[in-house]
Image (cartoon, helix red, strand yellow):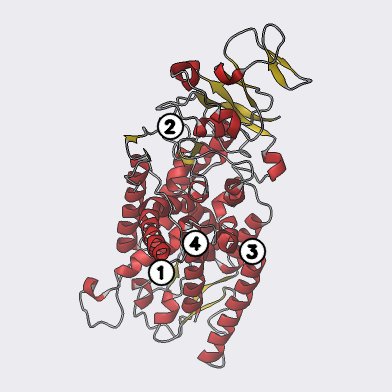
Amino acid sequence: MLKLIRRILSLFFWLGITFLFLDVSGIFRPLFSWMMDLQFLPSLMRLDYTVLPLLLFATLVLGRIYCSIICPAGVLQDFFSWIRGWKIFRRNSKARYANRFHYSEPKQWLRITVLVLFIVTIMAGVNALMVLIAPYSAYGRMVITLLRPPYIMLNNILATWSEANDNYLFFTVEQQQLPVILIWISAVSALILLVLSIHGGRTYCNTICPVGTILGFISKYSWLRINVNEDKCIKCGLCEKNCKAACIKVSKDEPVHIDYSRCVVCGNCQQLCPKSAIRYSHHAKTKAEQPASDNDTSTLSRRSFLSISASLFTAAALKADEKTTDGGLAIIEDKKIPSRTTPLTPPGSLSARNLQQHCTACQLCIAQCPNGILSPSQSFDSFMQPEMQYTKGYCRPECKVCAEVCPTDAIRPITIEEKTAIQIGRAVWISKNCIPLTDGVTCGNCAVHCPTGAIQMVPKDKGYTFDTESGRWLDESGNPADLRTTLMIPVVNEEKCIGCGSCEYHCPSRPFSAIYVEGNEVHREV
């Protein structure tokens, strides 16, 4: 029963978090966004004084149920290790149980070394190591790069079929082009997890993962844990051979040894024990305390697990090849990303430096951005963290999805009013790229689409003045000017500009926009 409950809860969390990363319509965000708040490392990064104590208390009472149920990377390892139990991997295909694992000595030196390096790099503000080995972030990258592209492809196929049948339940989504290095890192991470899980079950959790090391130390003192009744145990070794954490050691002449710092309370040992000698209970109970019957013990164990678990979880409660054409006659050249001195980071991130120190590069904000303007950075100091580019869209003032989904508060929650007053950068005009000057035609797209009115079109030629009373331009003689024959160029009011990128996105100049947004080192209010 313990194993069944764990499987149901872990499957629920795993599917919820996976669909949160795959979501293209926003329907899963209200349903499962609370799950990302329960992730240990993100809650630690944002210093959540509600979730973090809750997770630590749950570990102290129930053991490492976080690693077994809530962590998506942990559940993925269980799936990979389950593959080894298939008949094709068994030496004896008729065997009732697959002898998949064996006890291994704890690699304490490796666990402590990785944890110390992990803490030192975070304190130094260099998150490269954290970004690579953090379980939640690593899983998010794998979903974004390996599962999301086929998911979007399937969605677009359904959207085409629905449209043909006058049904608009689905809509077409553009496939985002991801950096090759991000795809390689995700693929290698998935391969490492696969190999380690098939060979040794929870090897990654118990040797590399810093979250597993922290919670493992606490779980050594957990109130409920796996206990063996030595009077009933026949030393068959089934528990050892099927322990995915490789933490049970069975010896003929010694009591069964369980390394509780590595046990993830999966329930395999309890389910397979032919003599019901293993139970999930308070460790202070001695073998002399014999229950009236095995059924009573099982019922008590299930009740304890269910009641505490219920309290815990209730409280926690292929880029398209098509290009736009002008009348089918000429291909419009794609825009190129300008070289920015300071990178653009989303409103709420305070500054590029603050984002670098707190972001775990889980890619959730990139996946959920409805405007498609967030992409993984390829620079060393902010590797795989989100940065803003305005080639496919702009940051709409009414949107704050990235701030809502960020699990670490690297992008802090903000209101619509606050966002419209945050200047993340300011528009810069490049005269040599501007169409009125290069082609001698009128434009004004940047001024028309500026949501804050920070851009105004003024006559190119000198001698014109603006009359504030009449709201018109006057020529040198003081008469109303005929601007139909006068070229107009943009002027940016930096006190009004918030750096949303609407001007850069809507500028028709190719391949580089005539106006682009340069980031602020520190965001400020306007």
Q: Residue furthest bottom?
A: 292
Residue 188 versus residue 449: which sits nearer the camera?
449
What residue type is disc 4 on? Cys
- Circle nearer the viewer, 1 or 3: 3
Of marks 4 and 1, which one's residue comes earlier in the chain?
A: 4
Residue 307 versus residue 183: which sits nearer the camera?
183
Dot 3: within a 10 Å radius of its alpha carbon, few (fewer than 14), some, or many (20 or more) residues?
A: some
User: On the image, numbered disc 3 is attached to which residue?
Assistant: 316
Of marks 2 and 3, which one's residue comes earlier in the chain?
A: 3
SS class, disc 1: strand
What residue type is disc 1 on? Ile
Q: Residue at x 71, y 20 (%)?
A: 472
What residue type is disc 2 on? Phe
User: On the image, numbered disc 4 is attached to which residue?
Assistant: 67
In the rendered view of the protein, which quadrant contains the C terminus?
top right
Residue 178 versus residue 474: which sits nearer the camera?
474
Q: Residue at x 37, y 66 (%)?
A: 79
Residue 290 showing in the rendered view: no
User: On the image, numbered disc 1 is attached to which residue?
Assistant: 248
Of marks 1 and 2, which one's residue comes earlier in the chain?
A: 1
Alpha carbons under labels 3 and 4: distance apart: 16 Å
Q: Position of residue 316 (x, y in %)?
A: 64, 64
- Circle nearer the viewer, 3 or 4: 3
Residue 151 showing in the rendered view: yes
User: On the image, numbered disc 2 is attached to which residue?
Assistant: 380
Of marks 3 and 4, which one's residue comes earlier in the chain?
A: 4
Alpha carbons under labels 4 and 2: distance apart: 30 Å
